[in-house]
Image: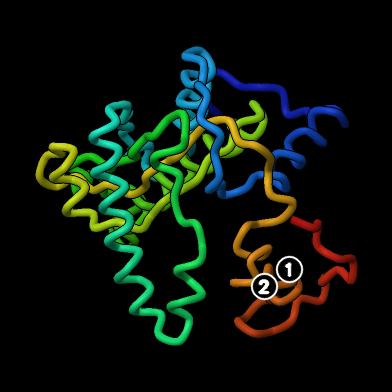
């Protein structure tokens, strides 16, 4: 056991409910209403991200705060360029995809680029056979920030439509680093009642029972609940 420990007591009902509420009401936001994120709030969100778990405690996240309008416009252009390529790759769904709003880079109060630093190959603990765990760890930081933002009444969107080499060059990132996400953050007019892509009928949340197996792949779980998933 580590030298210092925390009591293994569950949260009370109100605290538990708040955690689950943030999880179920978190949304990947695309519509922002400008405004500002107060500096103390932004710092709380970044601390939440920095307290994420990481494989081998490698902490593979760096945040680049982008406030310059010209730089935001360049990032916006990179996203729009990839949007066109993605639409073409989707074939028969191209026109449907092009109707979706995919970013809020020019509208959000804050834009943060999460980038993974160089030297990640030195972190072998937990990554010898699964080197992609740097990405998984960085995603945990993003999720922490997402949930904290929702608790603060702020929206956040993860934009992944960009050429990582071009974005790294634009931000002057060192060789071996890798941008993983453009995060749009700030006040929103309202949170979507359900995930935007579900509202737009692009895709739908699968039942949890389809995701649970017992012992081996494809073996239905005996403990599958007949209760419906939480909406949202």
Towards the viewer: 138 or 206:
206
Decide if residue 3 is in sight here: no
- Quarter of image, res 56: top left
Q: At 86% across and 66% down in the image, what residue appears? A: 228
Is residue 85 rendered to the left or right of residue 194? left
Q: Is residue 41 above or below residue 54?
A: above
Badge 1 marks a residue whose secondary structure is: helix
Specify the quadrant that holds the C terminus.
bottom right
Is residue 97 rendered to the left or right of residue 26? left
- Quarter of image, res 163: bottom left
Residue 65, position as x, y percentages in the image: 33, 28
Residue 94, position as x, y percentages in the image: 43, 78
Q: At 18% across and 38% down in the image, what residue appears? A: 171
Towards the viewer: 128 or 137:
137
Task: Estimate how packed mark 2 is, as few (under 14), some (14 to 19) or many (20 or more) residues with alpha carbons within 10 Å.
Answer: few
Task: Estimate how packed mark 1 is, as few (under 14), some (14 to 19) or many (20 or more) residues with alpha carbons within 10 Å.
Answer: some
On the image, numbered disc 1 is attached to which residue? 208
Q: Spatial distance from mark 1 to mark 2, Cα to Cα?
A: 5 Å
Kindly identify which numbered label has been placed on residue 73: none
Towards the viewer: 57 or 45:
45
On the image, numbered disc 2 is attached to which residue? 211
Residue 116, position as x, y percentages in the image: 28, 43
Decide if residue 169 is in sight here: yes
- Quarter of image, res 189: top right
Q: At 71% across and 77% down in the image, what residue appears? A: 210
Q: At 35% across and 71% down in the image, what residue appears? A: 86
Check whether the beta carbons of the residues at disc 1 and disc 2 lie within 8 A of each other. yes
Specify the quadrant that holds the N terminus.
top right
Badge 2 marks a residue whose secondary structure is: helix
């Amino acid at each position: 056991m580590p030298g210092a420990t925390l009591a293994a007591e569950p949260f009370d009902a109100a605290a538990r409910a708040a955690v689950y509420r943030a999880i179920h009401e978190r949304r990947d936001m695309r519509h922002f209403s400008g405004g500002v994120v107060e500096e103390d709030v932004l710092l709380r969100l970044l601390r939440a991200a920095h307290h994420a778990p990481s494989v081998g405690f490698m902490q593979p996240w760096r945040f680049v705060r982008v406030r310059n309008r010209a730089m935001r416009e360049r990032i916006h252009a990179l996203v729009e360029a990839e949007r066109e390529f993605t639409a073409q790759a989707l074939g028969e769904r191209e026109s449907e995809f092009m109707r979706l709003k995919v970013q809020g880079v020019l509208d959000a109060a804050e834009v943060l680029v999460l980038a993974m630093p160089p030297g990640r190959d030195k972190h072998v603990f937990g990554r010898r056979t699964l080197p992609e765990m740097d990405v998984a760890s960085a995603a945990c930081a993003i999720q922490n920030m997402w949930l904290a933002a929702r608790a603060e009444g702020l929206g956040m969107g993860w934009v992944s439509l960009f050429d990582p080499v071009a974005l790294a060059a634009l931000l002057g990132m060192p060789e071996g680093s890798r941008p993983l996400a453009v995060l749009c953050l700030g006040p929103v007019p309202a949170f979507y009642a359900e995930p935007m892509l579900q509202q737009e009928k692009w895709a739908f949340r699968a039942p949890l029972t389809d995701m649970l197996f017992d012992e081996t792949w494809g073996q239905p779980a005996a403990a599958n609940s007949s209760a419906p998933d939480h909406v949202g």
